[in-house]
Amino acid sequence: MAASSIKLLENLINYCSLKNKIISKNIANVGTHNYNREDVEFKSMLIELNSSAKVTNEKHIKTGPAENPYYEVSKDKEDEMLSGINNVDIDNEMAELAENTLLFKFASRKIGDYYRNIQNVIKGGSR
């Protein structure tokens, strides 16, 4: 696995960590009047992921370096009161939390595997 892949996995872990905090905040405020749900935009992660993509046709999506390397937290301006009090849908938040947990576990296991392989090579393999 290349060092650039490890960096992408680290960015995914950072994204998942922030996403978990935001989802938890939304769940905690499900009963708060006029609370606006928050979400994490990962456009900088997508841009970084595609920055190494090779454009072979002028109709392909143009990518470039991200202006802001951090993920942005945005307020959901949806007016529909899904919980009767605010726009937080507890079922949707729980589903996003489960998906986010799977992404985090995937990235952390891949990074762990990478470093275990390096450790095995340093120790001399299966000797």
Image (cartoon, rainbow, N blue to C red):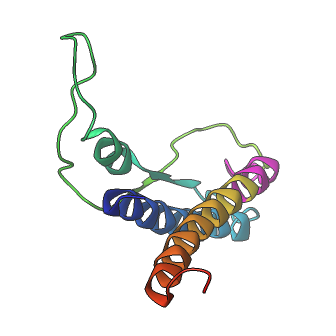
What's the magenta region? Answer: 85-97
Task: Pick the quarter of the image with the N terminus.
Answer: bottom left
Tell whether position 53 is magenta: no
User: x, y (%) of residue 110?
Assistant: 57, 64
Q: Residue at x 62, y 81 (%)?
A: 126
Residues 28 and 110: in front is 110
Q: Quadrant of residue 46?
A: top left
Q: Nearer the viewer, residue 57 or 73?
A: 57
Identify whether 75 is placed above or below 17: above
- Please tell me which residue is depicted at 31% across the width and 38% down the height of the picture: 50
Is 104 on the left-hand or right-hand side of 92? left
Residue 108, percent across and down? 58, 70
Quadrant in which the C terminus is drawn: bottom right
Q: Is residue 56 above or below residue 69?
A: above
Residue 83 visible in the snapshot = yes
The residue drawn where x is 69% and y is 63% is 101
Horizontal side of 5 relative to 90 (left or right) equals left
Residue at 47 percent of width and 62 percent of height = 15
Q: Position of residue 81 (x, y in %)?
A: 71, 43
Q: Is residue 33 visible?
A: no
